[in-house]
C-alpha cells in the first residue's frame, strides 16, 4: 500500500526518496552503438551472463517447488506445431507451461521480479520501448523434455502467415531511434547448445516486406535461414516480436527451461493480463522500480511512475490547473 500511495502523492519523488526507493543504477544508462547496430540488423540480441549461477539455481529451485502447477500442452487444440513436421518433435510430448512466478511467496519470486527492472536490462528496455515501458503479458516459464514439440514460426512486422502489416508487433527505426511494439525477454535457465533446439529466429525478418513460405513456417524449407542462438543459463535473449521466431523441437537429454517476459511501450497493450491491475500477490514485497513496470497503459505525462536512466523512480505530472479543468469537463483529472 505504501508504494501505491507514493505513486499517487502530490510530491512522489520526495516521498519515494525518503523511503529509500530512489537510488542510482550501477550500470550503463544506454546501449552501445555495436548493440544498436546488431539489434537493427538481426532483430534480437543475446545478453551474456546477466544472472549468476547462484541466481539461476535460485530460480530453478523455485520452479522445482511449483512443478505440480505445470500444465502440459498435449491436446491437439493446444499444440503449437503442424503434425509430422520437423518442429513437432516425437508427436507426443508437449510443451510444459508454468505461470504465476511474480506472485510466488518469499524468495521464490526474486529472480523473476528482477527481470522487470534489473539495472543490466533497463537500458535495453529504454532503448527499444522508451521510458515508462510496461509488462504486457503474464510471465511464462517454459519447460521441455527431450522430444517435446517446438513452436512454428510466428510474429513479424509483416505477419509471416498472412503477409499483412502487424502494428501490434511492429519494429521500426525513426531518426536513429529503434522502436518495437512488443519486446520479448527470455531468461535462459538451462544451457542451449548448438543443435539442442529451443528458440529459433529468422535474422532480419523484422524488416521483411512479404509473407513467409508455409514450408519455412513449419521448419521444412530454407532451414539455412533459421538460426538457433547458442546460450548459457543466466543469459537473456531480447527480441522484437516483429522478428519472425519460434522454437525447434527439444533434442537434448537435459530439460529445457526459460522464463519468458513480454514488454510494451507505456501507451500500448497487446495482452489483457493486467486488466486494470495484476494479481495482488504480484505487488507484495516488490520494489518501487518493479511495481512501476506493472502500471496499465497510459502516457508518461499522466502521473506515470517511470524508471529514469539514473535508476530513480520519478513521476511527471500535468499542471494542476489543467487537471482541474479536465475534472470540470470530464469528471476526472485525466482526459
Image (cartoon, rainbow, N blue to C red):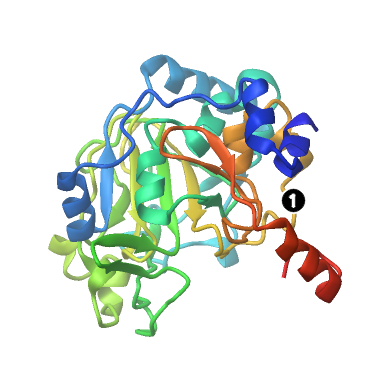
Q: Image height check: is 317 above or below 306? A: below
For label 1, the SS is loop
Name the residue located 35 percent from the left edge and 44 percent from the top edge. Answer: 124
Q: Is residue 1 visible?
A: yes
Name the residue located 38 percent from the left edge and 25 percent from the top edge. Answer: 51
- In the rendered image, which quarter contains the C terminus? bottom right
Q: Across the whole image, how many numbered discs are drawn on residues?
A: 1
Q: Quadrant of residue 156?
A: bottom left
Name the residue located 20 percent from the left edge and 54 percent from the top edge. Answer: 227
Toward the top, the furthest residue is: 54
Instruction: Report x, y in % for residue 10.
Output: 74, 42
Q: Which is nearer the eye, 72 or 43?
A: 43
Residue count near mark 1 (Cα–Cα under 10 Å), binned few <14, some 14–19, many ≥20: few
Q: Is residue 248 visible?
A: no
Q: Image height check: is 226 above or below 5? A: below
Instruction: Report x, y in % for residue 59.
Output: 51, 25
Q: Which is nearer the eye, 83 or 109?
A: 109
Instruction: Report x, y in % for residue 114.
Output: 51, 30
Q: Image height check: is 128 above or below 180? A: above
Q: Which is nearer the eye, 245 or 96?
A: 245
Q: Is residue 59 left or right of residue 285?
A: left
Q: Is residue 157 left or right of residue 306?
A: left
Q: Which residue is mark 1?
A: 277
Instruction: Report x, y in % for residue 314.
Output: 57, 40
- In the rendered image, which quarter contains the N terminus? top right
Name the residue located 31 percent from the left edge and 63 percent from the top edge. Answer: 243
Q: Image height check: is 163 above or below 74? A: below
Toward the front, the furthest residue is: 321
Q: Is residue 172 left or right of residue 116?
A: left
Amino acid at each position: 500500500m505504501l508504494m501505491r500511495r507514493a505513486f499517487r502523492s502530490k510530491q512522489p519523488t520526495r516521498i519515494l526518496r525518503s523511503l529509500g526507493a530512489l537510488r542510482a543504477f550501477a550500470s550503463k544508462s544506454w546501449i552501445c552503438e555495436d548493440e544498436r547496430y546488431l539489434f537493427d540488423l538481426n532483430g534480437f540480441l543475446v545478453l551474456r551472463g546477466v544472472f549468476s549461477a547462484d541466481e539461476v539455481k535460485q530460480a530453478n529451485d523455485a520452479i522445482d517447488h511449483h512443478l505440480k502447477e505445470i500444465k502440459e500442452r498435449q491436446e491437439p487444440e493446444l499444440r503449437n506445431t503442424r503434425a509430422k513436421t520437423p518442429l513437432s518433435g516425437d508427436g507426443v510430448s508437449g510443451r510444459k507451461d508454468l505461470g504465476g512466478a511474480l506472485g510466488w511467496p518469499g524468495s521464490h519470486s526474486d529472480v523473476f521480479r528482477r527481470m522487470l527492472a534489473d539495472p543490466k536490462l533497463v537500458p535495453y528496455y529504454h532503448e527499444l520501448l522508451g521510458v515508462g515501458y510496461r509488462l504486457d503479458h503474464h510471465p511464462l516459464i517454459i519447460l521441455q523434455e527431450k522430444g517435446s514439440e517446438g513452436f512454428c514460426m510466428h510474429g513479424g512486422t509483416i505477419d509471416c502467415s498472412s503477409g499483412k502489416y502487424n502494428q501490434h508487433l511492429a519494429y521500426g527505426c525513426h531518426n536513429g531511434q529503434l522502436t518495437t511494439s512488443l519486446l520479448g525477454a527470455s531468461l535462459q535457465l538451462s544451457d542451449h547448445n548448438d543443435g539442442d533446439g529451443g528458440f529459433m529466429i529468422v535474422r532480419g525478418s523484422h524488416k521483411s516486406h512479404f509473407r513467409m513460405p508455409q514450408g519455412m513456417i513449419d521448419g521444412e524449407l530454407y532451414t539455412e535461414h533459421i538460426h538457433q542462438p547458442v546460450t548459457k543459463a543466466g543469459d537473456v535473449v531480447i527480441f522484437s516480436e516483429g522478428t519472425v521466431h519460434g522454437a525447434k523441437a527439444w533434442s537434448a537429454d537435459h530439460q529445457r527451461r526459460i522464463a519468458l517476459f513480454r514488454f510494451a511501450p507505456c501507451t500500448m497493450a497487446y495482452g489483457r493480463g493486467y486488466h486494470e491491475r495484476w494479481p495482488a500477490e504480484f505487488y507484495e514485497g516488490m520494489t518501487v522500480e518493479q511495481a512501476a513496470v506493472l502500471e496499465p497503459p497510459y502516457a508518461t505525462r499522466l502521473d506515470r511512475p517511470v524508471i529514469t536512466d539514473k535508476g530513480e523512480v520519478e513521476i511527471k505530472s500535468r499542471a494542476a490547473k489543467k487537471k482541474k479543468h479536465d475534472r470540470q469537463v470530464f469528471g476526472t483529472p485525466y482526459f
